[in-house]
Image: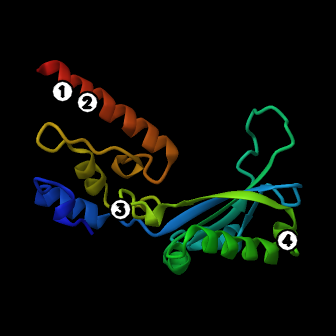
């Protein structure tokens, strides 16, 4: 929920209603640097079919470098992503506790190889970020995405995947909406 104290002056009621209408569940991602690549390119908690049937709960373990055109320096990175209310309790942990819990789950899938190969990690707990407070938006009525993308008072712009009607929940949507807002901000500035 939007608390009016975040914005001064407060946001218009239609903007607050749009923010409250968009489901942005808790979520986090942890990037683990590993000594060896003991894992496949992707693994999901309840299988691909399970993810399709229950898209509101996502838990994936994958190689974030897969398919990237990067120099081969032997670096092995394993990403652990969990999104949804099922994982909300984990998102309340501090970074080290959260990394340990994720590593325990990786160990369960890969016979203890996560702990044996762990070098270091980086936690991105979106639920704890004060200006994010969740993962990414889940599909909603497009009128809410549209309302979120509208300028407030000719000065305040919102941009991100949550303002995209066509590409909500995706990095593509975030990038395109960021560009839209930047062009709009520049146009507003040049009008002065």
Displayed quadrant of residue 151: top left
Mark found first going from the N terminus, 1 or 4: 4
**In this rendering, which labeled residue sits more in front, label 4 or label 2?**
4
Q: What colour scheme has been applied to the protein in the rendered image?
A: rainbow
**In this rendering, which labeled residue sits more in front, label 3 or label 1?**
1
The local crowd at label 3, few if under 14, some if 14 to 19, many if 20 or more residues have their Cα within 10 Å, is some
Q: Is mark 1 on a helix, strand or loop?
A: helix
Looking at the image, residue 150 sits to the left or right of residue 24; the answer is left
Q: Quadrant of the C terminus?
A: top left
CB atoms of marks 2 and 1 within 8 Å: yes
Residue picked out by circle 4? 110
Rendered position, 24 above or below 66: below
Q: Residue 140 carries which label?
A: 3
Q: Is mark 3 on a helix, strand or loop?
A: loop
Measured in 3D between alpha carbons, the distance from the residue under mark 2 to the one under mark 1, in whole angstroms, is 6 Å
Instruction: Name the residue rendered at 56%, 74% in the picture.
Output: 54
Measured in 3D between alpha carbons, the distance from the residue under mark 4 to the one under mark 2, in whole angstroms, is 48 Å
Mark found first going from the N terminus, 3 or 1: 3
Displayed quadrant of residue 6: bottom left
Image position, residue 188 (x, y; %): 18, 27
Measured in 3D between alpha carbons, the distance from the residue under mark 1 to the one under mark 4, in whole angstroms, is 54 Å
Instruction: Name the residue rendered at 11%, 42% in the picture.
Output: 153
Measured in 3D between alpha carbons, the distance from the residue under mark 2 to the one under mark 3, in whole angstroms, is 24 Å
Looking at the image, residue 131 sits to the left or right of residue 113; the answer is left
Instruction: Name the residue rendered at 27%, 45% in the picture.
Output: 149
**In this rendering, which labeled residue sits more in front, label 4 or label 3?**
4
Q: What element carries label 4?
A: loop
Residue picked out by circle 2? 184
The local crowd at label 2, few if under 14, some if 14 to 19, many if 20 or more residues have their Cα within 10 Å, is some
């Amino acid at each position: 929920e939007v608390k009016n104290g975040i914005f001064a002056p407060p946001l218009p009621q239609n903007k607050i209603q749009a923010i409250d209408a968009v489901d942005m569940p808790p979520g986090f991602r942890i990037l683990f640097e590993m000594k060896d690549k003991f894992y496949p390119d992707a693994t999901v908690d309840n299988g691909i079919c399970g993810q399709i049937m229950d898209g509101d709960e996502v838990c994936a373990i994958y190689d974030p470098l897969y398919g990237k055109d990067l120099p081969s320096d032997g670096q092995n990175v394993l990403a652990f992503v969990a999104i949804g209310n099922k994982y909300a309790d984990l998102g309340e942990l501090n970074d080290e506790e959260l990394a340990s819990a994720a590593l325990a789950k990786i160990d369960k899938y890969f016979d203890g190889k996560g702990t044996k190969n762990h070098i270091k990690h980086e936690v991105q707990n979106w639920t704890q970020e004060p200006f994010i407070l969740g993962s990414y938006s889940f599909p909603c009525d497009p009128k809410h995405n549209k309302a979120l993308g509208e300028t407030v008072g000719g000065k305040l712009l919102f941009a991100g995947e949550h303002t995209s009607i066509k590409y909500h929940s995706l990095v593509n949507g975030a990038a395109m909406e960021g560009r839209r807002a930047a062009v709009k901000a520049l146009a507003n500035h040049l009008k002065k």
